[in-house]
Image (cartoon, helix red, strand yellow):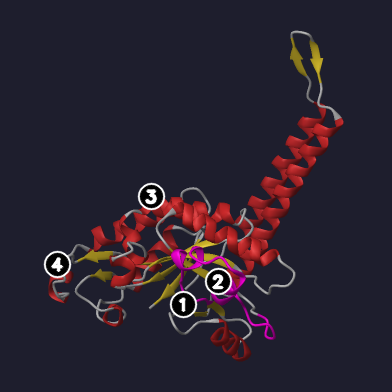
Amino acid sequence: MMRNDGLLAATTIQFISLISWLLLQWSLTSAFVRSNGIYRMDRPQVQRMKFILCAAKRNDDKNAEKNDLLNKHSRLCLAPMMDYTNQHFRAMVRLISANTLTYTEMVAADDLLSDKTDHNVKQLLGQSATIPEGPSVLQLGGNDAAQLYNCAKIYHEYSQKDNHKCEFTALNLNCGCPSPSVSGKKCFGAALMKDPKHVAKLVRAMHDGVEGKIPCTVKCRIGVQDNNDNTPFSRKTYDRISEKKEYEQLRSFVDAIASDGIVTNFQIHARIAVLGGLSPADNRRVPPLKYEYVYRLADQYPELNFVLNG
């Protein structure tokens, strides 16, 4: 399920363009009174101001273009799957469907930053040399803002090189993986849902790393249940949890992430992630699906896009 608000996006871009134009006019005509008389901007200052505003507009246009592409192709998605959705698998899917939005395997920040050689970067970020990638999302995993900034920057710089084929429609932060090796030892994936404000910082870092040129999105669950003692998941116990409270926690998570306007697209696996007590495979089938939570979010946040998963 997905909500589009193309009119809002177009209006926002027009508003930004208008403000940019007004700032430029003000910069060209304003005079500042100083104690020693009148000071006006000289030609080099005017040229620098023009360059800054034009560069900002190009970034906004590029992001809007990618965002439109992301929303258009989010109706059918190939979910990120470790050991499956590599560049070869995605190329095969692209032969079958030109419009499916594909996701990479999750690229852990440690794996990308520990070896920045062209060979390793190509292994993790590379795309088919013969089959167009099409609409696709690079998913990153990590819990350190500086690391995720550097990962996004590496991708951005790598994508600018003429001899490398690497261009994604969006970046995505993994906030849904319940695997013990991810949410346990390394404290990212679904574990991040416990700290929404930190997630907002992580996405901001990714956004800055790509200079705001492509959308940043979040893939998450409807919540997490932390079984630190690895006690088995009990459906009976889970059913006693207030659905109102559970939904409000999810809504608070979305509020925190979307508050600064960077993330407008969420992919939500409509069941909780049980951290401890369930294997990754069981986490995909044992906790009950609650599509109605995502429907409610879509109703309450018409300016955001929600993709239902699970």
Discs 1, 4 touching: Cβ within 8 Å: no
| Label 1: which secondary element | loop
- What is the three-letter code of the residue carrying label 4? Asp
Vertical placement of 38 versus 81: above or below? above
Q: Which residue is mark 3?
A: 197
Can residue 99 be seen from the camera position used here?
A: yes
Task: Assess disc 2: are there few (<14), some (14-19) or many (≥20) residues with their C-alpha within 10 Å of its C-alpha.
Answer: many
- What is the three-letter code of the residue carrying label 3? Lys
Taking depth in this image into account, of 159 and 98 the one nearest to the observer is 159
Taking depth in this image into account, of 150 and 95 the one nearest to the observer is 150
Q: Which residue is mark 4?
A: 229
69 sits to left or right of 247: right
- Which image quarter: residue 253? bottom left
Tell me which segment is drawn in magenta.
103-132
Discs 2, 1 touching: Cβ within 8 Å: yes
Does the segment drawn in magenta span residue 33?
A: no
Marks 1 and 4 sit apart, C-alpha to C-alpha, by 29 Å
Q: Which residue is mark 1?
A: 80
| Label 4: which secondary element | loop
For marks 3 and 2, the one nearer the N-term is 2
